[in-house]
Image: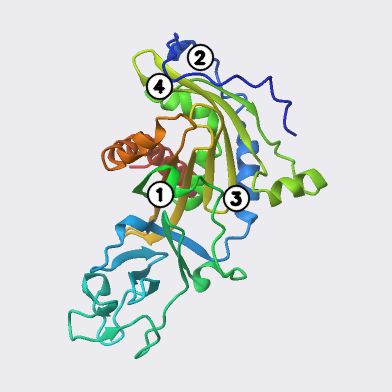
Amino acid sequence: MTRPLPPRRGRLPVRLRRDPVSWERQRPAWRDARPALIAAALARAEARASGNWYVVGATRELRPDRPLGRVVADREVVLWRDARGRLVAGPGVCPHLGAPLRDSPVCRGTLVCHWHGLALDGGPFAGWTPWPAHDDGVLLWVRLDEVGGEEATDAPRVPDRPATGRALTAVYTGMGRCEPQDVVANRLDPWHGAWFHPYSFADLTVVSAPGPDENGDSAEAAAAEMAGRADAFVVDVSFRLGGRLVVPVRAEFTAPGPRTVVMRIVEGEGEGSVVETHATPLGTDALGRPRTAVVEAVLATSGRRGFPVVRRAEPLLAPLLRATAGRLWRDDLAYAERRWSLRSTGRFPG
C-alpha cells in the first residue's frame, strides 16, 4: 500500500541556490528498494495490454523523400509517408528478391525499390502487405500482431502528455544488450537516481511506492488504472543545473504498459512535463544475446511567461536534452545489461 504523502511543496523558482546533500552523506536506499517490490511492479506492468504496438522512432526522423528502417523482434520494418502524407509501415524486405527497402527512395509518396524498381504505394502488392502504423506527433508506432500475440487495438495507448505545440520536445534513442523488462525494471527503481546519477539528481526521496502485494482489485485501484496512474512511484528530487544550482520537483513514475514507463512532474518547476521511456525488442545479436532499443521522448513545459521564447529555441535546445538523456542512459543501459546477464546466465557481463 502507498504511504500518505507529506505536505506538498510550494512552487520554487529555478534560480534557487542551496547546498544539496553530498553523495556519501545520502540516506542509504537499499532497504527501501526491495527486489520483491520492484519485481511485483514490473509484473503488473507486463500484464497490462499493449495492443501489439511498438515504438519504432521519432516522428522527426521520417523524411518525405526517404523511408525509415527499423528492426523489431528480428523483423525488418520500413516506414514512409504516402502521397496523402499518411504513415505507412510494412515488411522491410522487398517481396521480389529481398532488397532492403530502407535504402530505397520515396517518389511522390511511392516507395520504389532501388534493386529492380518495384513500386509500393502503401497498399498490398506482390505479396507485400502493410502493417498498422500510428504517428502521435512525437513518436512513430507499428503494430505487429504476430510478435505481440495480444488482442489488437486500433491505436496505441499514448500516455497523456503536453500538447506538442506548447512543449519543448526531444527524442533520444539508444540500444542495449538486454530485454525490455530490464529497461522497465530500471525505471521502476527510482531509488537509484541520486546514487547512480549524482551528476543529475540530488536529495532524492521516494515518498510513495506501491506495495509488492497490490493486485488492483479495489475500486480505488481500478480508478487509478483507468486514469493511467496505477502503481505510481512518487519522488521528491532536485535536478542539478550546475554547481549548487538545483531545481526541486515532485515527480510521478507510472508504467501504463508492458514496455513503457512515464515520468511526469506533478509539482514544481516544469509541472506537467513528461518523460516517456519506451523499450522495443530488436531481436538477438550474433551471439544470441537480446537487444533492446530505448526510445525516450522528453516533452518539457512551463507556466512561466517566457517559456514560449524558450520553446522557439527548440532546434538549439533539443540536442542538449538528447545529450542529457544519453548520459543517463549510458549508465542505465549498463545497469539493464548487467541485470539481464545475471538473470539469464548467472554471470557478470563480459
For marks 2 and 3, the one nearer the N-term is 2
Label 4, label 2: how many angstroms apart (C-alpha)? 15 Å
In this rendering, the answer to whether 42 lies above or below 2 is: below
For marks 4 and 2, the one nearer the N-term is 2
* The residue positioned farthest toward the bottom in the image shown: 126
Residue on which disc 3 sits: 256
Residue on which disc 1 sits: 294
Q: Nearer the viewer, residue 176 or 268?
A: 268
For marks 2 and 1, the one nearer the N-term is 2
Which numbered dot is residue 26? 2
| Disc number lying in front (4 or 1) | 4
The residue under label 2 is which amino acid type? Answer: Gln
- Element on which disc 1 rests: strand
In this rendering, the answer to whether 10 lies above or below 130 is: above
* Residue 140: percent from left, percent from top: 41, 60
Residue in view at x 26 percent, y 85 percent: 119
Q: Is residue 348 left or right of residue 211?
A: left
The residue under label 3 is which amino acid type? Answer: Pro
Residue on which disc 4 sits: 240
* Residue 54: percent from left, percent from top: 47, 61
| Disc number lying in front (3 or 1) | 3
For marks 3 and 1, the one nearer the N-term is 3
